[in-house]
Image: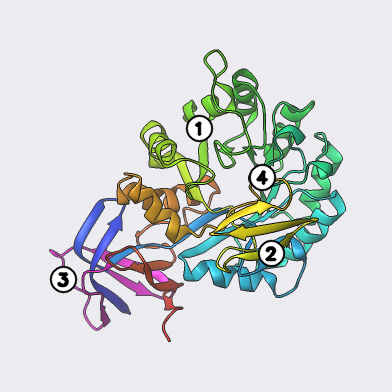
């Protein structure tokens, strides 16, 4: 048994200075505060008061470290996972951008074995049933109307691991498709949409439970039309994704969303593309050239945002700087996304029985150590 001692825990019971976590067989065996004696006969690692938080869960990752899940490159998933792990992400969905259906299916079938091996928490299809009028970073030419056979093609290609489907509820047949997806065990996220308030509520009624990067690639609320944003913010059954990079959502809206929804309804995601963790330069994202300058990724020629270069450690610091309490930001990076995709019985909190996926953070909230299944992964 290993005990991480003198840690400042961010746990479901609150922030606990002088706390400890005991690890055994890859799992959290026990959690205690300063009043409770450390387990005997354990190897003790003194964290010197540093933060100990659960590993982050990212519901939306396209790539990182120069690679993309869509590329089909055999070494891409490992490189992407490794890049994001050093920034605190220990569980993630692999997100597929909208592309011709056969391309999405091919990429999905290459990822399915990685879900079975435990390297990915599942697959997220961002499209292809999206609104071309709200394409954002997605390719409008590859978007198609809701189609039951196309959905089935994706489900089959994912071999049962299509965890999330992002769609636009205003498209004809979308509500029926929401029901189909949910019946097949796929969670539905609303995004890349111009749907109004009523239509969005109808999609939630039909079973949609997530919002893909709220505020981005959708119109904001108007005085007589609260829109998708209004419905998604308000509904108690919806978890909303936010890209806390100051580009996809203003810090004031980020903090406002936390006050409105609470951390149990917010998942801080990266929606990271290949350039995350790779610095500025030229990147190829699907059919388009993307120019990254100062961490801002723009589609060449159009000036439109091409995706984010965010990592979850930066999202944590940004949220805290925007005024979100640290414990709430950590919840939105771990427990809430884990619950949203049904893996909270395995990861996402400092609770006995869950995987020992843990982060040691310094006083400045920089990631200093990452443990996956109880093993340190960053130590030289
Ligand atoms: Zn998107």
Query: At numbered mark 1, what does the secondary structure look like: helix, strand or loop?
Result: loop
Residue toward you, 45 or 249? 249
Q: Is residue 103 above or below residue 193?
A: below
Q: Quadrant of the N terminus?
A: bottom left
Report the Cα–Cα distance between label 1 and label 2: 40 Å
Residue underneath mark 2? 282
**Which corner quadrant holds the C terminus?**
bottom left
Q: Is residue 218 above or below residue 356?
A: above
The answer to which quarter of the image holds residue 194 is top right
Q: In this rendering, which labeled residue sits more in front, label 2 or label 3?
A: 2
Task: Tell whether position 259 is magenta.
Answer: no
Q: Give the class, few, some or many, for how many residues have Cα within 10 Å of label 3's Cα (few <14, many ≥20).
A: few
Asked whether 111 or 276 is in front, the reply is 276
Which residue: 67% across, 68% down? 67
Give the numbered dot on residue 304: 4
Residue position marked by numbered label 3 in the rendering: 37
Tell me which image quadrant ligand 1 sits in: top right
Q: CA distance from mark 4 to mark 1?
A: 32 Å
Residue in view at x 74 percent, y 49 percent: 301
| Image coords of residue 223 (percent x, y) | 52, 15
């Amino acid at each position: 048994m290993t005990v991480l001692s003198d840690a400042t825990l961010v746990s479901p019971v609150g922030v606990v200075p002088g706390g400890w976590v005991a690890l055994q067989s890859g799992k959290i065996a026990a959690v205690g505060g300063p009043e409770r004696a450390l387990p005997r006969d354990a190897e003790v690692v003194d964290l010197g008061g540093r933060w100990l938080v659960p590993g982050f869960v990212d519901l939306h990752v396209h790539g990182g470290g120069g690679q993309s899940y869509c590329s089909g490159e055999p070494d891409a998933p490992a490189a992407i996972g490794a890049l994001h792990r050093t920034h605190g992400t220990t569980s993630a969905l692999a997100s597929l951008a909208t592309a011709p259906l056969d391309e999405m299916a091919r990429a999905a079938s290459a990822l399915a074995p990685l879900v079975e091996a435990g390297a990915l928490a599942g697959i997220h299809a961002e499209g292809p049933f999206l609104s071309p009028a709200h394409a954002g970073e997605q390719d409008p030419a590859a978007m198609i109307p809701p189609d039951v056979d196309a959905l089935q093609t994706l489900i089959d290609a994912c071999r049962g691991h299509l965890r999330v489907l992002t769609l636009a509820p205003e498209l004809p047949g979308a509500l029926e498709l929401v029901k189909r997806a949910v019946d097949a065990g796929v969670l539905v996220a609303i995004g890349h949409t111009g749907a109004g308030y009523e239509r969005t509520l109808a999609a939630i009624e039909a079973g949609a439970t997530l919002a893909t990067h709220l505020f981005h690639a959708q119109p904001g609320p108007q005085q007589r039309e609260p829109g998708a944003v209004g419905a998604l913010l308000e509904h108690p059954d919806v978890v909303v994704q936010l890209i806390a990079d100051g580009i996809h959502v203003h810090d004031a809206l980020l903090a406002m969303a936390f006050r409105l929804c609470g951390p149990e309804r917010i998942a801080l995601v990266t929606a990271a593309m290949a350039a995350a963790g790779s610095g500025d330069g030229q990147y190829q994202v699907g059919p388009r050239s993307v120019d990254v300058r100062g961490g801002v990724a723009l589609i060449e020629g159009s000036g439109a945002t091409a995706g984010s270069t965010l990592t979850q450690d930066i999202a944590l610091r940004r949220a805290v700087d925007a005024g979100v309490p640290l414990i709430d930001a950590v919840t939105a990076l771990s427990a809430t996304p884990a619950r949203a995709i049904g893996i909270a019985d395995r990861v996402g909190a400092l609770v006995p029985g869950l995987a020992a996926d843990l982060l040691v953070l310094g006083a400045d909230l920089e990631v200093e150590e990452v443990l996956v299944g109880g093993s340190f992964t960053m130590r030289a």
